[in-house]
Amino acid sequence: MVGFVALVLGVVALVHYYLWHRLIRSTTRPGRIRRVLTWILVGLGVLAPVTLIGSRSEWGHSLAWPGFFWLAVMFYLFVFLLVLEIPRALAVLTLGVVERGAGRWNPSAVVARRMARTAALADQSAPAGQSVRADQPLPAEQPVPVAHAGRPAEGSEAGPDLMGRRLFIARTAAVVAGAGALTAVGTGIRTALGDPVIESVKVTLPKLDSRLSGLRFAVVSDIHLGPLTGTRHTERIVRMINSLEADVVAVVGDLVDGTVAELGPLARPLRSLESRYGAYFVTGNHEYYTANGPQEWIEELRGLGIRPLGNERVEIAHAGAVLDLAGVNDVNGAASGDGPDFERALGGRDRSRSTVLLAHQPVQVVEAARYGVDLQLSGHTHGGQMVPFNLVIPLQQPMVSGLGEMDGTQVYVTRGAGFWGPPVRVGSSPEITLLEIQN
């Protein structure tokens, strides 16, 4: 934990230094304005890690909105400025080349400088009352200062213009990055706080008993009840799930970001979930991050009519046939001796029957495939939540979102119905899935 906090502090510090260099130092001249902007950025730099660390505590809830909003803006400022580095460098390089060419090849400028030197030499060397003849040879002409690498040499007449143009390029890049970041965050907030999308998916299971064909699962994950969500967030999700008239409701982890004492009222609408064969829950990594651990939430959900599947399975009897529905704990539970136990959940079953497994992280499909699971339902990734994080997820997980397969086991990864951290979703809308199995 200490190492993670140190990493977060280091990354935040580096990002803010980069933002200061590009948004303040490069766009302002030394003086009061630069100092004021610098201190404002320092304050925001302190707010970012304090929000990340304190948002799980009651004292930090008041910082959640401003802190997470700045984290999102900070991230997209960083992304846009990085993207603009190449065109910015090309513009500065081109400007330097143009200025050097103008200083070397402008005949008018050369003649004017020669005449100025002639007058200066005449004033300094001619005896009193004697003038310099026009045809008198001049001392060897000294080289004219020329700007190099886009920077004006001292004494060059192009200097002030060049510096002004470099400042213009820096300010233009800053304005473009700022506009892009605010637009991305603004639309991302609207998406994250809006209604989840209903994704309808049909999955063919070769071993499925034909009598089970058409069985429907409402899959929801990563609801993330926390300081930025309210009871309406839960009520809307429950209402949308109930409208699907599913046979089974599967809540595949990361329901909460806090304790029952803090967030219990936000979870109470879950007691109204409706389905033919019940609602089931497995833990996600965030259940293990809560101060009191996942057990209090497991008991709370039991009281709300949702059955936790902690490394166990149940039989879903439908139309005279039976489906095995299993669930395993999240991998983060291993540190406290409460990790996934596939043998306990899947061992000794009738392998002629199809099995659907609830497992929070897609990577758990590696173990599920060894047990011949037909379909795994997962979440965890948020579909990346904020582009370009979707490009990083494959470093840890086999899938980002949607339907895939590994070693004969199919896995569906839902993007989740909520958000974590900034209330922002860019390129990944929230989702509730209506998944139908067929043979």
Image: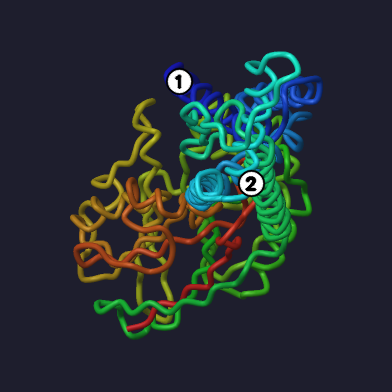
Find out whether the residues at labels 2 and 1 contact each other: C-beta distance under 8 Å: no
Residue found 52% across the figure and 26% down from its top:
14
Task: Decide: few, some or many residues near mark 2? Use Cα within 10 Å; few <14, some 14-19, many ≥20.
Answer: many
Q: Amino acid at mark 1?
A: Met
What x and y, as percent, mark residue 380?
46, 49
Taking the image as drawn, is residue 258 in sight? no
Q: Residues within 10 Å of mark 1 (few under 14, many from 20)?
A: few
Q: Position of residue 383 (x, y in %)?
A: 49, 57
Query: Residue, x 72% and y 31% (percent of image)?
Result: 28
- Tell me the quarter of the picture where residue 432 sits: bottom right
Q: Position of residue 38 (x, y in %)?
A: 71, 23
Residue 329 tag number: none
Q: How is the image coloured?
A: rainbow
Query: Alpha carbon of mark 2 to alpha carbon of mark 1: how far?
Result: 42 Å
Residue 161 drawn above or below residue 36: below
Residue sitting nearer the eye, 139 or 308? 139
Q: Which mark is residue 1?
A: 1
Helix, strand or loop at disc 1? loop
Q: On the image, numbered disc 2 is attached to which residue?
A: 169
Residue 376 position by quadrant: bottom left
* Residue 5 x/y as whole percent: 50, 21
- Which mark is in front, 2 or 1? 2
- Sequence order check, earlier mark of 2 and 1: 1
Vertical side of 166 occupied by 83: above or below: below
- Which quadrant is home to the N terminus? top left
Write the residue at 38% across / 63% down.
Answer: 315
Circle 2 — which element? helix
Q: Tell me the amino acid under the disc marked 2.
A: Ile
Q: Quadrant of residue 340?
A: top left
Left/right of residue 389 with respect to residue 269 in the rendered view:
left
